[in-house]
Image (spheres, coloured by chain):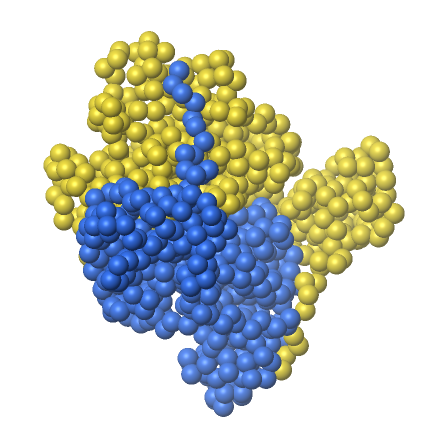
Chain colours: A yellow, B blue
Amino acid sequence: MQQPVLPIAQSGTRTLAAELPSRAGDDVRLAGWVHRRRRLASVTFVVLRDRSGLAQVVVREPRALTQVEEIGEETVVEVTGKAVANPQTPGGVEVVDPTFHLLTEPARTPPVELWRPAVNAGLPTLLDHAPVTLRHPLLRAPFELAAASVAGFRDTLGGLDFTEIQTPKIVGSVTESGANVFKLDYFGGPAYLAQSPQFYKQTMVGVFERVFEVGPVFRAEPHDTVRHLAEYVSLDGELGFVRDHRDVMAMVARVVAGMLDAVRERAAGAVERLDLTLPKLPAEIPSLHFSEALRLVGASPDEPDLAPAHERAIGEWALREHGSDFVFVTGYPMVKRPFYTHPQPDDPRWSNSFDLLFRGLELVTGGQRLHRYEDYVAALEAAGQPLEPFASYLETFAYGMPPHGGFAFGLERWTARLVGVENIRQVTLFPRDLHRLAP
Amino acid sequence: MQQPVLPIAQSGTRTLAAELPSRAGDDVRLAGWVHRRRRLASVTFVVLRDRSGLAQVVVREPRALTQVEEIGEETVVEVTGKAVANPQTPGGVEVVDPTFHLLTEPARTPPVELWRPAVNAGLPTLLDHAPVTLRHPLLRAPFELAAASVAGFRDTLGGLDFTEIQTPKIVGSVTESGANVFKLDYFGGPAYLAQSPQFYKQTMVGVFERVFEVGPVFRAEPHDTVRHLAEYVSLDGELGFVRDHRDVMAMVARVVAGMLDAVRERAAGAVERLDLTLPKLPAEIPSLHFSEALRLVGASPDEPDLAPAHERAIGEWALREHGSDFVFVTGYPMVKRPFYTHPQPDDPRWSNSFDLLFRGLELVTGGQRLHRYEDYVAALEAAGQPLEPFASYLETFAYGMPPHGGFAFGLERWTARLVGVENIRQVTLFPRDLHRLAP
């Protein structure tokens, strides 16, 4: 038999940049990318970048100075040397008397200067060269926020008895909304990419009562805006035994709080690097009925939807009057909501649905769903839809479903508002849109 | 302004079935599905099912007995009554003097009798009616195991400084393996569904050093077996600054341990319901080189791969000789591995790759990757591949990449081995294969 698997070689001996401040006086071995070289008359400062941050290496010896001349930025190296305190260096400890060992050939010069503190390239260049440009500490930061946020989403719901599910992204029929789906060749027949896990997550309420899913969704809308992508990550939740949409809203409020807590705890470095002010989330998120929202913004009471300017005005009102970067708008007209939406019991023009606006932009959509089989049949008939494509979905309700509701966040919209960027592509690893299918 | 969002109505007042044992003597309100009615001469036992388990309700009053007659299995009800100790009842506490309140119309009779302790239907029926059949406590259990396993996967890697990523599932070119991809119409041009996040996760090692992703992958292989699906959930990890594939294997061993711990902690109910014996995982997973594996099973030393019977024999050897349900096979012939595989330095016929067999079946594939730009160019040229479709991927290596490697688990295969079922469709919520695209 071969030797058993050994413990990870470097775990005991590699020092991360973030650990350096506690290692003054020690011999250390760092590994990472040459982030920056700064040449002065008799000394060169090499800034090494690893997953934890940056470390300064001071090069004075002629042999090392010659070696460093040939190691371009982004070359991957190991550095052994001595950690010494220096109050002038960031973090207070730097590495002196270094020996460099190359782990690859010297790297080519990147298409964007990653060592500059600011990003000095346009979005098309950044996206075209994403495999390299994402290494910039400011450009990777949004993805640290996203990872923390998703962890907070899951932890919050997992702690409240939600079960995680994975539902199929290839579906056999177009049901939720008639158009705007990608069609594919499925072993010679037609199939489609799922626009959302809506039907599946409702179905799974019948199994687990409370479920969530984090996964890709696909929209073939030929939008060419800063807010739309052809593929994005949807954070979905659905729960049974609710009173109405207000229980769903209370759950959304807990999820948002959990996501912000996770950002604070798990992505503090990214928050600091981006110099972010995290949003204000009061103990109670303010809430307006759609009809009140129209009055507030001075729109006609017959408007069926809120325009972007209206959403911005409502966001400003919530911040001004309630100290909140978040505001719920409830009761959207039934005509603007999908067929499975539960009407408002005392006035069925309105619905038991809501949007959550975050800094004046729609972030979450949710609501109470119909739960009675007969209500589904009536809603589909009223929409002029045949029942047959919905047969499996309808089975869920024929065999007993509790009052339930749910919600969906777009991850990229969340991150964009958190970071304060207009274009959602800036917070998407490899965006897909009308014009972009690579890298 | 509308009333602020209230706390969840039921949270303070609803008692879950699993909480009943601690509520003896109290007035309680339960909510859930009528799982089973058992009628005796003067009493009917109603078993109520909720997300936490089953609760017994004892009906003796004539009015309630009449009411219960009309409430079919799967009807969603609220039950108020008194919790009383009864040593004969499962859990030791049952509900007496009940009042039933229907939350929906009485449910139709399900296509499969969900109240029977055993599942008495064939797989096609179970899959055709998955929205309902998944409610059976034995059929939902594998998905509790899967959810716990995924949480264990993430928690283990998150605790080791891995960053979670989400990479696109729509890709512009077919690169990783020439065939077996689903093609779709992307705004009038061709695009494909990603077979794996392989290229993206390697790229992201350049950004975060250590990354993981949990997401769907798509295989258009026209396989018609119990082991293959057209869409499945892949648990992917990739890490930089490794010595070689042994560091990756050590990480896989930690991940497997973390997944099993999570199953024990988070899915104890499912383990008990399915009466599972969890696999034996020794402190060191045994490991065989491919050439040794061939000798062990008596195969010709020229065999390029292991047949299923070989894998089973190796699994039996690992259990017999090392008390392990897991065994690594390393060094698979380069000819059977993808172009990005790192060769074994002392003998380039072999590779720095591995499979992890779980109870005699391949569970994980992984290995060290090439990390030098020139090695990629040479490997692609040797494979007769043009460089241009790989331009973005190659950029990753031209600008400096550390030695790295990674691994991928198929979630459904993991769950199938854990549960001990042959057919992967039994542990997939809504499977997709040559013949099945619904529900």
Q: Quadrant of residue A54?
A: top right
Q: Is residue A59 depicted above or below B282 in this figure? A: above
Q: Position of residue B407 (x, y in %)?
A: 52, 62
Of all residues, the one furthest to the top in this rendering is A298
Labels in figure, total = 0
Q: Quadrant of residue B345?
A: bottom right
Whether residue B385 is visible, yes or no, is no
The single residue placed furthest to the right in the displayed view is A25
Q: Is residue A273 left or right of residue A399?
A: right
Residue A90 shown left or right of residue B427 in the figure: right
Q: Nearer the viewer, residue B76 or A81?
A: B76
Q: Quadrant of the N terminus of chain A?
A: bottom right
Could you tell me which residue is drawn at 33 percent across and 66 percent down? B117
- Residue B67 visible in the current orientation: yes
The correct choice, above or below, for B382 with respect to A398 in the image is below
- Residue located 52% across and 29% down the image: A418
| Residue drawn where x is 78% and y is 48% of the image | A66
Instruction: In this rendered view, identify the residue nearer to me: B158 or B276.
Output: B276
Name the residue at the bottom extreme: B298
> Residue B161: percent from the left, percent from the top?
62, 50
> Residue B115: image x %, image y %?
29, 61
What's the residue at 42%, 63% (across, down)?
A: B88
